[in-house]
Image (cartoon, helix red, strand yellow):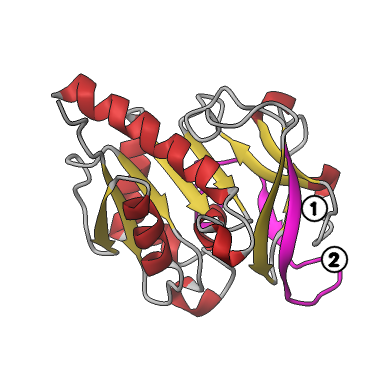
Amino acid sequence: MAMPRPRIGVVTYPGSQDDRDALWALAALDAEAVPVWHEKRDLSRLDAVVLPGGFSYGDYLRCGAIARFSPATAAVCEFAEAGGLVLGICNGFQILCEAGLLPGALLRNETLRFVCRDARLRVERNLLPFTSRCTAGQLLVIPVKHGDGRYVPPPGLDPAQVVLRYVDNPNGSIDGIAGVCNEAGNVMGLMPHPEHAVDPLLGSDHGALILASLVDSARRHALAAA
């Protein structure tokens, strides 16, 4: 009996750049990748949601500050509050922080310059829907490309919410934090781009570990709902 392909939505905002890459990567990992326009208000038929990278609304005011008020973001908040799986990548991470689904903020890189290169990461927490295919302490190579990726956590951030750390901090993030989750563990954001590290021909397939973990978790949700 064939396993069901989980339906994973990828939200496109005006200015999104990596939505098509995320759709391709998820489909390559055996998910039914579903485009979601920013005016969509109902995500109930999805098993997980991805907020991709790019420059939503031109990054005016502040990265993610306008997208935070999009109808789709309101739907994502409802989806997450009901226990749905949500992954934010780069600009998607910024939007999740602006929306209050993740703690902290993403500020200008310490160098005040855009950075675009492979980054080495260490998995701090692997028992999550987004890292179940990883091992604790595993090193990953996943590219970054951002100008506002310096993560600043709130005072007293629970160390258990830190999912990934940079080995070679490319942006000055506090404590080298590259990715965090919410307290419930069903929402995660990271600045590196796993969708650009799925095919080894691109230099690394380590991003597939994160996205395939999400596909696995979404598939279990699909089976439970069937």
Task: Give the residue type that dot 2 points to.
Answer: Glu
29 above or below 182? Answer: below
Circle nearer the N terminus (2, 1)? 2
Quadrant hosting residue 110: bottom right
- Please say whether residue 96 is one of the residues in the magenta stretch: yes
Residue 118 appears in view:
yes
The x, y position of residue 7, in whole percent, is 24, 44
Question: Residue shown at 21%/30% (left/top)?
Answer: 3
Residue corresponding to mark 2 = 110
* Viewer-closest of 194 and 53: 194
Q: Is residue 97 above or below residue 67?
A: above
The label shown at residue 163 is none
Residue at position x 31%, y 45% in the image: 30
Towards the viewer: 50 or 63? 50
Question: Is residue 194 in the magenta section?
Answer: no
Quadrant of the drawing holding the C terminus = top left
Crowding at dot 1, Cα within 10 Å, few <14 / some 14-19 / many 20+, comes out as: many
Q: Secondary structure at mark 2?
A: loop
Residue 36 at x, y = what percent?
A: 26, 59
Of the pair 205 and 130, the residue shown nearer to us: 205
Is 127 placed left or right of 149 in the picture? left
Residue at (43, 37) in percent of width and height: 214
Give the number of callouts: 2
Q: Residue 10 location, x and y as percent? A: 34, 56
Q: Residue at x 36, y 28 (%)?
A: 83
* Residue hosting label 1: 173
The boundaries of the magenta stretch are 95-122
Is 113 on the left-hand or right-hand side of 59? right
Q: Secondary structure at mark 1?
A: loop
